Amino acid sequence: MKQSENSGGDTLAAEVLNISRRGLWLLVKGREYFLGFDFFPWFRQATVEQLCSVELLHEDHLYWPELDVDLDLDRILYPEKYPLVAKAVDEPPD
């Protein structure tokens, strides 16, 4: 039997480590990142299943298909460089 060349690829290149009331911790290619709900509000009302369904696309691009959210690692590392924060669907406008 011939093994697939892609068997056991980067299936765990990105995974959720922990979720709290303040945000979630991701492990991406061996490095931890914190995504606080203040900077990433669209994750606040997501289910655990939706949050854990994260994919690493390319080398620095994360995608949550069930939430239709995509972020690059620069935005996660330096959210202050990106002052426009999307409002979660259920949040009232300012």
Image (tube, rainbow, N blue to C red):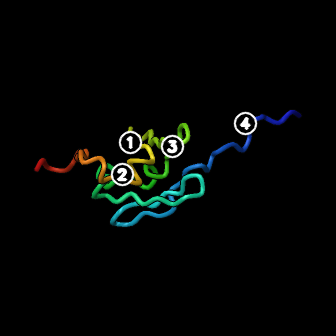
Q: Which residue is mark 3?
A: 60
At label 2, the amino acid type is: Ala
Foreground label between 4 and 3? 3
Q: CB atoms at circles 2 and 1 under 8 Å apart?
A: yes
Front residue of this view, candidates 32 and 10: 32
Q: Which of the two labelled residues, at mark 2 and mark 4, occupies the earlier sequence position?
A: 4
Q: Which residue is mark 4?
A: 6
Do we see residue 67 in this rendering? yes
Residue at 38% x, 48% y: name it: 75
Label 4 neighbour load within 10 Å: few <14, some 14-19, many 20+: few
Q: Which of the two labelled residues, at mark 3 and mark 2, occupies the earlier sequence position?
A: 2
Q: CB atoms at circles 3 and 2 under 8 Å apart?
A: no
At label 3, the amino acid type is: Asp
Foreground label between 3 and 1? 3
Q: Which residue is mark 1?
A: 67
Q: Which residue is mark 2?
A: 46
The reply, left or right, for residue 92 in relation to residue 48 is: left
Mark 1–mark 4 distance (CA, rounded to whole Å): 26 Å
Foreground label between 2 and 4? 4
Mark 3–mark 1 distance (CA, rounded to whole Å): 18 Å
- Per the image, label 4 sits on a secondary structure element best described as loop
Residue at 46% x, 58% y: name it: 33
- Per the image, label 3 sits on a secondary structure element best described as loop
Foreground label between 1 and 4? 4
- Per the image, label 1 sits on a secondary structure element best described as loop
Q: Which of the two labelled residues, at mark 3 and mark 1, occupies the earlier sequence position?
A: 3
At label 4, the amino acid type is: Asn
Front residue of this view, candidates 12 and 61: 61
Do we see residue 88 in this rendering? no
Mark 3–mark 2 distance (CA, rounded to whole Å): 22 Å
Q: CB atoms at circles 3 and 1 under 8 Å apart?
A: no
Quadrant containing the N terminus is top right
